[in-house]
Image: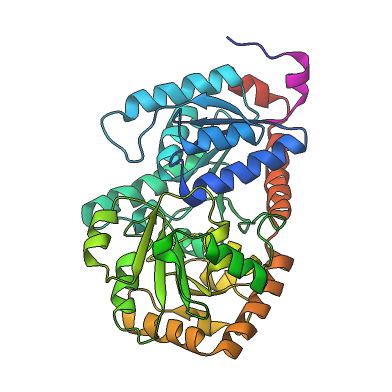
Amino acid sequence: MLHMRPAEERQLTVLHLVQPVDGGVARVVTDLVRAQAGAGMRPVVACPPGSPLAREAAAAGAQVRGWSATRAPGPRLAGEVAAARRIVRSCRPHVVHAHSAKAGLAGRIAVRGRVPTVFQPHAWSFEAVQGRTAELALGWERFGARWADHILCVSESERRTGQEAGIAARWSVIHNGIDLARFRPGGDAERTAARAALPPLARTPPGSPLVVCVARLTRQKGQDVLLRAWRRMRVPGARLVLVGDGPEEAALRRAAPADVVFTGACEDVLPWIHAADVLVLPSRWEGMALAPLEAMACGRAVVMSDVGGARESLPPGQGRCLVPPEDPAALARALTALLTDAGLRDEVSRRVLRHTRTTFDVRRTAGAVSGLYQELVGMSGPTTRKRTER
């Protein structure tokens, strides 16, 4: 067994078990471990080696352990559970924080309540599938809840979805937060500079509207709905940019009209946000999406599907930023209104900017999560260390 040095014994050690390792989940984990390391904790991130998260978490101050888990359950699950158990035994955490469905599955089976455990779904697995697969996913979440001291949701909507699906748990709701020092307002000069730095295919003439969607190219994020909406648009010179990659990229490229640009994977989305007139996210389901928060913190108007967490992201009275999911006609109308009415767009931008910068500071989020850890460790008392040694 690996024995800690005395200094490590005094630190609150948090093991983040994570899969997937890109997109919003990776950004949430990276922001958390940066804050935790800065507060004197010992964050450990177990994730697939060589992944974007492994690099970003190490740079943020976490100890990184290789955990070669795939995104979806499969025949390798037993080996992934065993590997997770070995990592828990070696780093001896006070708290295990399992992120998203796959890590939540493997982590809770590996630990089975012997270490204080937080499970954060980052949107429910049973919403992502249909038929018998959805029934199995929901059945697991109902059963697995017994092995989580808290289920941590990023929105009240996500919590309600779990409760209404019959998941019995001790719930905590802590909204996502963003780095307000990084995502800050940009004026006309920043927009002009950002557009000038774009790849040639994404550049638009001065005054031409630019719509940006920042998300993995997956069914969840609804870019197929966006492309159907875009074909209905009648805004002269408008261009749409899809920032990201993912399993639906080939199909989306085949379906896209000529004025849609694909960027592929992108490590820094900030220039795209500053270049945009409007950011759009037509998701089919969410917990609480980060990209709209980041855009609003930069003073950009947004259009989102009215799914989990979207209303909680917005200030009261901003229903014009919401459209029903899977409704291309409504999405086209909302985008057209914002692109063709500069006064409306500026009003929306000002309101969402004020709201986001007063409500969604990642420091507040990280502090609330740390408070939850302290509560769990305090409840466990001196048995915490004994649990980790089993």
Q: Is residue 35 above or below residue 15?
A: below
Measuring from the top left, give residue 42's x and y in whole percent.
69, 29
Q: How many labels sit on residues?
A: 0
- Name the one closer to the observer, 329 or 240: 240
Measuring from the top left, give residue 363's x and y in whole percent.
73, 51
- Name the one closer to the observer, 230 or 132: 230
Q: Which residues are magenta?
A: 5-15
Q: Quarter holding the N terminus?
A: top right
- Name the one closer to the observer, 141 or 334: 334
The residue that appears at 53% across and 75% down in the rendered structure is: 277
Measuring from the top left, give residue 55's x and y in whole percent.
54, 33
Residue 86 appears in the picture as rendered:
yes
The residue that appears at 23% across and 59% down in the rendered structure is: 251
Q: Quadrant of residue 175?
A: bottom right
Residue 282 appears in the picture as rendered:
no
Horizontal arrangement in the rendering, residue 176 relative to residue 283 (left or right): right
Measuring from the top left, give residue 16's x and y in whole percent.
56, 35
Horizontal arrangement in the rendering, residue 87 relative to residue 379 (left or right): left
Q: Is residue 340 above or below residue 125?
A: below
Q: Is residue 288 magenta?
A: no
Q: Quarter holding the C terminus?
A: top right
Q: How is the image coloured?
A: rainbow
Q: Is residue 8 magenta?
A: yes
Q: Is residue 155 above or below residue 3?
A: below
Q: Is residue 13 above or below residue 212?
A: above
Q: Quadrant of residue 381?
A: top right
